[in-house]
Image (cartoon, helix red, strand yellow):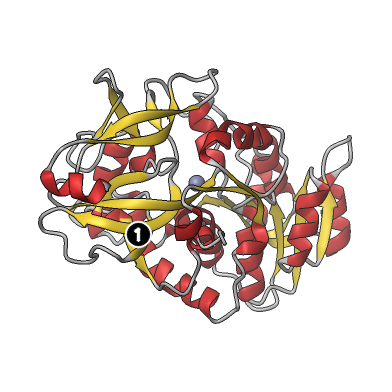
Amino acid sequence: MASDVAARGAAFEIRAVVLREPGRPVEVETVFLQPPRRGEVLVRVAAAGVCHSDLHLADGELGEGRWPMVLGHEGAGVVEAVGEEVGDVRPGDHVGFCFVPACGACRACRAGRRTLCETAARNSVAGMLMDGTSRLRALDGTVLQHGLMVACFADHAVVPAAGAVPLPTSVPLWQAALLGCGVVTGIGAVNRAGLRVGASVCVIGCGGVGLQVIAGARLAGARTIVAVDTDEGKLSLARGRGATHAVLAGGGRSVVGEVLAITGGGVEHAFEVVGRAATIRQAWDVLAPGGTATVVGLAPHGVEVCLPAIEFLSEKTITGSYYGSTDVHAALGQLVELVVDGRLDLGDVVSDLIRLDDVELALERLRRGQGARSVVVIDEKLAGVGP
Ligand SMILES: [Zn+2]
Ligand SMILES: [Zn+2]
């Protein structure tokens, strides 16, 4: 048992999906995980979602030096052991991962903008935990980075205690796995935009996060929700989550023209959930005067966006939302209650349940824009999908 080894303080072997370098397929390797130190917890991972940010990392689009790395940042599991000075969680607790374990002390945290925590950002970009070091080693001793301070494409993960949010056991972990990235990012962006009941909304990109934006818009009382995607399957999932209209993008069709026609001149809120210059521009172009575009999609380093400056006179706004722009711990607690109450379905966005060995295939599907969310089931029984 990993927990016995952890208690003795020795590193133990785990199976983990390792990105050796961009352009090379990711592979499952046996690697060493050191036990949790002060303020850290060891989690047995049940399930993990494959997110577009994993693909950006795998393709080297988030900057140099972010490898070798154990990937995965959206997941859930059960706490196996805790380090010193951990009070919020104990062994046996179900937890969802939070990839910005806010320090509570930096300028951003003190200003209440915890998803912008400076300490977490610095260590996350370096692939290290909050003390600036890694618990992961390859078998030859090479230091491995923790993907977004979570590294949950693995059977075990050591994360900062603030990166493990307690969840009720009533929600199966293969569904709870989605809470800590896709759900909080999507629904948080809707909260940040401050939708009014009856609002008109356009959501560009209906993958794992976009579908949550649509669910959030429905919960917030939007009247018109136009979903845009290049994939018919994702548009049909979008309709199931509350989209009132669906626009198929690509093939030379005018997305902007169609959205303007459907909405009689544009929407109050557009959400861009792709991370490309062209779709960010579309989010701007589908706005009615006075409307707000919120960019949620993660664009690769170096991407720039052009906007027609005269349209600032029509009081349009463009802004961004990172990780739901919220206190993720509080938000996860509220969102999971919606799931328990049956008001938010998590399973309906999952297009594929896969094994750890198939993460590269899931990344390939994301590259092609196919499927909504693949969830890696690492422990069937723990995840709640097995017999
Ligand atoms: Zn993500
Ligand atoms: Zn901070």
240 above or below 148?
Answer: below
45 above or below 348?
Answer: above
Give the quarter of the image for residue 357. top right
262 above or below 126?
Answer: below
- Tell me what residue is drawn at x 79 percent, y 43 percent: 230
Q: Label 1, on which residue? A: 78
Q: In this view, does 94 lie to the left or right of 311?
A: left
Q: Where is residue 213 in the image (x, y as percent from the top left)?
A: 61, 60
Q: How crowded is mark 1: few (under 14 residues within 10 Å), some or many (20 or more)?
A: many
Q: Is mark 1 within 8 Å of ligand 1?
A: no
Residue 159 visible at all: yes
Q: What residue type is labelled 1?
A: Val
Report helix, strand or loop for mark 1.
strand
- Tell me what residue is drawn at x 55 percent, y 59 percent: 386
Tell me the quadrant of the picture where the C terminus can be found: bottom right
Residue 327 visible at all: no
Q: Is residue 6 left or right of residue 285?
A: left
Q: How many marks?
A: 1
- Tell me what residue is drawn at x 42 percent, y 56 percent: 76
Q: Where is residue 218 in the image (x, y as percent from the top left)?
A: 67, 72
Give the quarter of the image for residue 331. bottom left
Q: Nearer the viewer, residue 285 or 354?
A: 354
- Tell me what residue is drawn at x 51 percent, y 28 percent: 58
Q: Where is residue 289 in the image (x, y as percent from the top left)?
A: 71, 59
Q: In this view, does 272 lie to the left or right of 53?
A: right
Q: Where is residue 286 in the image (x, y as percent from the top left)?
A: 75, 52
